[in-house]
Image (cartoon, rainbow, N blue to C red):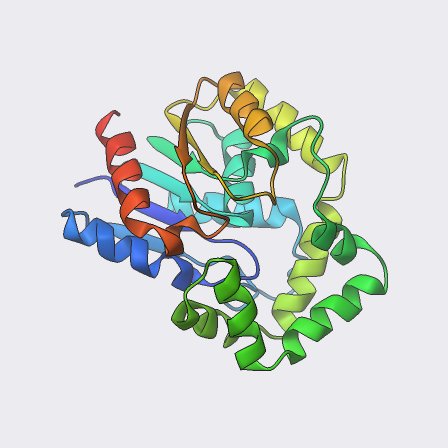
Amino acid sequence: MGTTKVFVHGNPETSAVWSLLVAELKKRGVDNIVLLTPPGFGAPTPAGWGGTMREYRDWLIAELEAISGDIDLVGHDWGAGHVYGVLSEKPGIVRSWAADCAGLLHADYQWHDMAQGWQAPELGEQMVAGMVAMPDDQFVDAFSGLGMTREIAAEVKSKIDDEMARCILALYRDAAQPAMVAVGKQFVAAQPKNGLVIIAEGDHFAGSLETMTAVANSVGADVAVLPEVGHWWMCQRPDLGADMLMAHWASQ
């Protein structure tokens, strides 16, 4: 059985963000692909779901353990956060890993302004309610301007509801500092092997080039810098993303 390529997306997203990258990988002969959807972010939440970092970590561990054979794991945004949490707990659970937003794990990381808004009482509730109520065309305009395509942004907006809003607040509030610093320390102590830290040159949500590179160096991970793309690099240049991942997987 071939190695399964497993992708995990973040917030506010659905697995639609991977669609162009998956198409590029299939052109290159990669078809053993699984897109995992975190509860609340395009998939239903189980009864009693609290939306904590630990719950998302344990959800991902269970999903990975249900897959037979070797796994090459790829995470984006909070999907990357979940990947880092899993590797901190079970560093040998996958054959290889690739993830962006590594600055989340740096000792000096401070959450970006929107995240701090979600973490704030009352303000956070107002912010997520506004996103749920936002007209579809306004959402598409905003997020296509940030790097999604209009088609992908429209698909994502169709899944943004009150339950996603609840999970956004729960997750970001659970991850308020020093929570991420603690995950970073555990991640470095675990020393997960065969890693690739993806750095999109224009992505400023999760640290600087220097902090992300430092995190990669701390566990001996490779670094790939994608020029002239932002947070949604897989939507903007899926061809570059596919070439990067193919090279990473081939080196294992």
User: For this rendering, which residue is in front, 24 or 149?
Assistant: 149
Which quarter of the rendering shows the N terminus? top left
Residue 192 in view: yes
Query: Residue 239, relative to residue 133: is it above or below?
Result: above
User: Is residue 128 shown above or below 64?
Assistant: below
Quick one: which residue is furthest to the front in this view? 228
The residue positioned 33% from the left and 30% from the top of the image is: 95
Q: Nearer the viewer, residue 148 or 161?
A: 148
Q: Position of residue 229 (x, y in %)?
A: 44, 46
Q: Quadrant of residue 69?
A: top left
Relative side of 32 to 77, left or right: left
Q: Residue 247 occupies which quadrant of the picture?
A: top left
Coordinates of residue 119 in the picture (x, y in percent) = 78, 53
What residue sits 30% from the left and 38% below the top? Answer: 245
Q: Is residue 107 left or right of residue 153?
A: right
Residue at 73%, 48% in the rendered image: 174
Front one among 80 and 88: 80
Where residue 45 appears, as percent x and y from the top left, is 57, 65
- The reply to whether residue 67 is visible in this rendering is no
Q: What residue sits 49% from the left and 24% below the top?
A: 216
Residue 164 lies left or right of residue 33; in this view the side is: right
| Quadrant housing residue 136 | bottom right
